[in-house]
Amino acid sequence: MLLKKYSNYNLECGVDEAGRGCLAGPVTAAAVILKPDFNHELINDSKKLNSSLRKKLVPIIIENCICFAIKNVSPKKIDEINILNASILAMHKCIKALEPNPDFILVDGNKFKTFRNIPHKTIIKGDAKYLNIAAASILAKYYRDTYMKKIHSNFKNYGWIKNKGYPTAEHKKNILKYGLTRYHRKTFKTN
């Protein structure tokens, strides 16, 4: 069972991102403040869940949170500021959109920049340790995967419906064969 919270603050938000290691598509972040009495035995790191279970958990998370936000940062912006800064920017955009504002920010990973002087803590593999980060990881992954499936219909040569923009052998081979799209990150190498 995951821990509910890290801090003693009332409004602790969990934050995570999806798509950081991709060759195509946005980096997507989610932030969520769960209701204090909420718990769910199936919520875990999104990478440990299959797509149908993530889809089932999304409305449960949304119904049982005080607030949530999901934001993308485009491939163009990723190329301008690099993937780490783009991931943090996506997280900041999510936190900014939360109403009410959080008192404390719990972040998956080991890199974050202070946001509006709100105290924060980074937790390596936090999505497998804390319920609010795990919930954010599910939201980010579900919404990013849904976006990649949607744009796949216009760019079927790249297999995004399956690989979601990640650097699979097939995806890299098809980039070399068909070239880059406007959804590809130009600063990533394919070999």
Image (tube, rainbow, N blue to C red):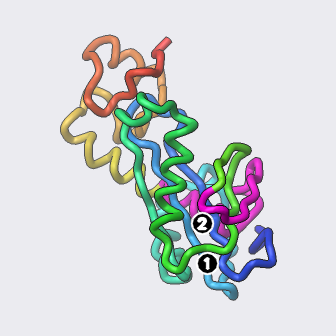
User: Mark on residue 92?
Assistant: none
Residue indicated by mark 2: 135
CA separation in Å, label 1 and label 2: 9 Å
Q: Are marks 1 and 2 in contact (CB under 8 Å)?
A: yes
Q: Is residue 7 left or right of residue 177?
A: right
Q: Position of residue 67 (x, y in %)?
A: 51, 77
Q: In this view of the protein, which residue sits in the foreground, 104 or 33?
A: 104
Q: Could you tell me the amino acid type at mark 1?
A: Leu
Residue 131 lies in the magenta-colored region: yes
Q: Which quadrant would residue 35 be assigned to in this image?
A: bottom right
Instruction: State the image coordinates of residue 92 (x, y, percent, origin top left).
Output: 53, 56
**Residue sitting at x 48%, y 26%:** 167
**Callout in the foreground (1, 2):** 1
Check disc 1 and report the residue beneath it.
Answer: 34
Image position of 183 (left or right of 30): left
Residue 163's place in the image compared with 71, above or below, is: above
Count of numbered tags: 2
> Can you name the residue that lies furthest to the left here?
154
User: What amino acid type should be assigned to the residue bearing mark 2?
Assistant: Ala
**Among the 4 quarters of the image, the one containing residue 50:** bottom right
SS of the residue under disc 2: helix
Q: Of 70 and 85, which appears nearest the observer?
A: 85
Task: Give, as a single range, the part of the protein colored magenta.
Answer: 115-141
Q: Position of residue 85 (x, y in %)?
A: 54, 39
Looking at the image, tell me whether mark 1 or mark 2 is earlier in sequence order: 1
Q: Residue 183: say if magenta.
A: no
Q: Eyeballing the image, is 133 above or below 184?
A: below
